[in-house]
Amino acid sequence: MLKSWITALLLAIALVTTGCSTAVSGLQQYVDSLKGYEFLYPNGWVQVEVQESSEGVDRVFRDIIERSENLSVVISQVPEGRDLASLGTPTEIGYRFLKETNTAAPQGRETEFIRAGSYQDAKNHAHYLLEYAVELPSGQQRHNIASVAVSRNKLFTFNVSTSEDRWQKVSDRFEAMAKSFTVY
């Protein structure tokens, strides 16, 4: 009797601590085996079709309640035989993206590069993690985190974005989403 009571207590403690332990619960997996990538995204987000999207945009998901929160996957070509490290360091790539974004962005959009780092995904591909703060021409403040990887002569960019007001609340979850991005 005591043994079963202790087992039940340990199980209850495990369930309670697991449910409260992280901000990354409630994520589901998206897999595109044809194009060779996968990632986690929150329950309550749906895939949307974006009219007149930028070149290379492959997928876009949006929160159905916080409609300004979204993620996108962009795929572009890289020269054959190039890997991520041959394209530059995380900081170099981060500043290159910043320059390209500011050049292509509407007048009045300002982007600040916050940080860059690197990690290996579950399939042992190198990734760069890039973080930006963005001010739109309307004055709206946004926060973006991106994961960048190269596989099969393609550059994959996974970007998650929210308003600056919500960033502190969702930053752990968004970073977990970015780090869940895997290419193969």
Image (cartoon, helix red, strand yellow):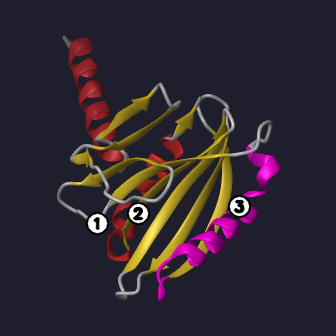
Q: How far from the left and from the top, in percent, is residue 48? A: 27, 49
**Is the stretch drawn in magenta largely helix, strand or loop?**
helix
Q: Amino acid at mark 1?
A: Ser
Kindly check if marks 2 and 1 are in contact, taking CB atoms under 8 A apart as contact. yes
User: Would you say residue 173 is visible in this rendering?
Assistant: no
- Residue for badge 3: 93
Residue appearing at x 27%, y 32% in the figure = 15
Between marks 3 and 2, how big is the CA–CA gap?
A: 19 Å
Between marks 1 and 3, how big is the CA–CA gap?
A: 26 Å
Q: Earlier in the sequence, mark 1 or mark 3?
A: 1
Q: Is residue 115 left or right of residue 157?
A: right
Q: Amino acid at mark 2?
A: Ser
Q: Is residue 128 left or right of residue 72?
A: right
User: Image height check: is 155 above or below 109?
Assistant: above
Q: Amino acid at mark 3?
A: Ile
Q: How far from the left and from the top, in percent, is residue 71? A: 39, 54
- Residue for badge 2: 161
Q: Which mark is residue 68?
A: 1
User: Would you say residue 47 is visible in this rendering?
Assistant: yes
Please tell me whether mark 2 sits on a helix, a strand or a loop.
strand
Please tell me whether mark 1 sits on a helix, a strand or a loop.
loop
Q: Nearer the viewer, residue 44 or 81?
A: 81
Q: Callout 2: 10 Å neighbours few (<14), some, many (20+)? A: many
Q: Indicate yes or no whether the magenta region holds residue 102.
A: yes
> Which image quadrant: the C terminus?
top right
In the displayed image of the protein, which residue is found farthest to the front? 52
